[in-house]
Image (cartoon, rainbow, N blue to C red):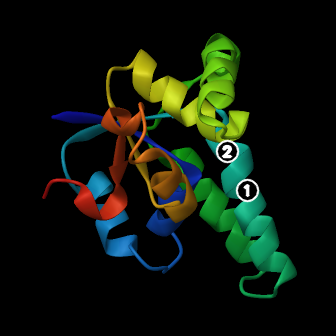
Amino acid sequence: MSLFVVDASVAIKWFLPENHSDAALRLLTQQHTLYAPDLIFSEFSNVLWKRVQKKEISKSEADSTLDGLLALHLQVQPSQAIVPLALEIACRVNRTVYDSLYLAAAIVFSSLLVTADAKLYRALSKGPLSAQLIWVEDIPQ
């Protein structure tokens, strides 16, 4: 069994068809323990809100999609406990504290952050935190 931290860019792919959805779904179909900072719920909901605003999904679809995320057995890390580390990371690698919360969780749990956020991945994949990061398509099968 593997342990991964997932970000909202991966979680949204579990419910809405997007590029890399098949790879993201492998995290749910295999024996993995999945962690995320509590921030994932607001980021995920914000994506749903944007989709409703663009009329890509209905409010009812957004509600049921959020229910789906809430029903998953994610191990949730309170942000309060890791925000000091996230701030340190953000200042060190020039990324937002939001993104850095996921990295902080990966460090705390000695795991990898799985992301489908190409900008985040490109920014960090060659730096000092690259060992904490894995691209969604690179999840072992």
Residue 58's x, y, as percent? 77, 81
Query: What residue is shown at x 31% (from left), y 54% (from top)?
Result: 28
Residue 90's x, y, as percent? 66, 30
Give the distance between the C-alpha atoms of the residues marked 2 and 1, in whole angstroms. 6 Å
Left-right relation of 67 to 126: right
Query: What residue is shown at x 44% (from left), y 16% (from top)?
Result: 108
Left-right relation of 115 to 136: right
Secondary structure beneath disc 1?
helix
Whether residue 124 is situated above or below residue 65 in the rendered picture: above
What's the amino acid at mark 1?
Ser
Secondary structure beneath disc 2?
helix
**Residue 41: mark:** 2
**Quadrant containing the N terminus in the rendered view:** top left
What's the amino acid at mark 2?
Phe
Q: Could you tell me if residue 59 is visible in this image?
A: no
Q: Could you tell me if residue 29 is visible in this image?
A: yes
**Looking at the rendering, which quadrant does residue 128 occupy?**
top left
**Residue 45: mark:** 1
Left-right relation of 96 to 138: right
**Looking at the rendering, which quadrant does residue 56 occupy?**
bottom right
**Quadrant containing the C terminus in the rendered view:** bottom left
Whether residue 25 is situated above or below residue 84 in the rendered picture: below
